Image: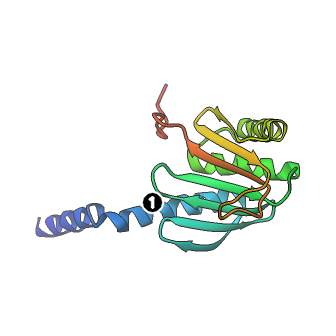
Amino acid sequence: MLRLTTLTALAGALLLGPAPARAADACDVLAARVIRTTGASLAGRAGPVAVFRAQDAERLSLDCRAPARITVASRDREPSPAYFVLIGRAAQALAGADAAAVEVLALNLHQASLLADAPRRGGAGRILMLCETGPRTDALRDDRTVCRVAPRPGLSRIRRAG
């Protein structure tokens, strides 16, 4: 009985440990899922932000702060189709979204952004996305196409039976 109490206390300490440790673990799990789903490799991590190397984008980054979001950037004003496939896979890793539907959304938002010369927003299932093209003045200033993906608020990632 004493052994069971000790194990219960240890499990409780692990589950109820400091919040930064739990957040780091959750971010590690999400970063691993991004790697598995997209084929990208981890380039580095600082706190809640992980940066990846991806063949089809200049930048792929994950910000684990709530709500978690992924940024995919390209230096091309009109990226290759593989860029949009990568966005679909990143959304699948982030929120369990339908990769093909997100790929189409990203392409449509990108085209709309080119035509309007302004950022465009949209959603598909479990995610919301903003895509923009053109010169930038922020940290991504050299990138010409940037899409940000975040989970749609209010939707649970837990699958329900039925």
User: What residue is shown with label 1?
Assistant: 26
Q: Quadrant of residue 127?
A: top right
Residue 17 in picture, x, y percent from top left: 27, 66
Residue type beneath disc 1: Ala
Seen in the picture, residue 132 relative to 14 is either above or below; the reply is above
Return the residue nearer the eye: 105 or 161. Answer: 105
Classify residue 30 as left or right of residue 13: right
Residue 114 spot, x, y in % from top left: 83, 41
Q: List the single residue furthest toward the front.
A: 137
Indicate the quadrant containing the N terminus: top left, top right, bottom left or bottom right: bottom left
Could you say whether the residue bearing mark 1 is in a helix, strand or loop?
Answer: helix
Residue 71 falls in image quadrant? bottom right
Depicted 4 relative to depicted 107: above or below: below
Q: Residue at x 43, y 66 (%)?
A: 24
In this orientation, which residue lies closer to the viewer: 115 or 49?
A: 115
Left or right of 37, for residue 96: left
Front residue of 125/141: it is 141
**On screen, residue 57 above or below 3:** above
Position of residue 118 measured from the top left corner of the image (x, y, whole percent): 74, 41
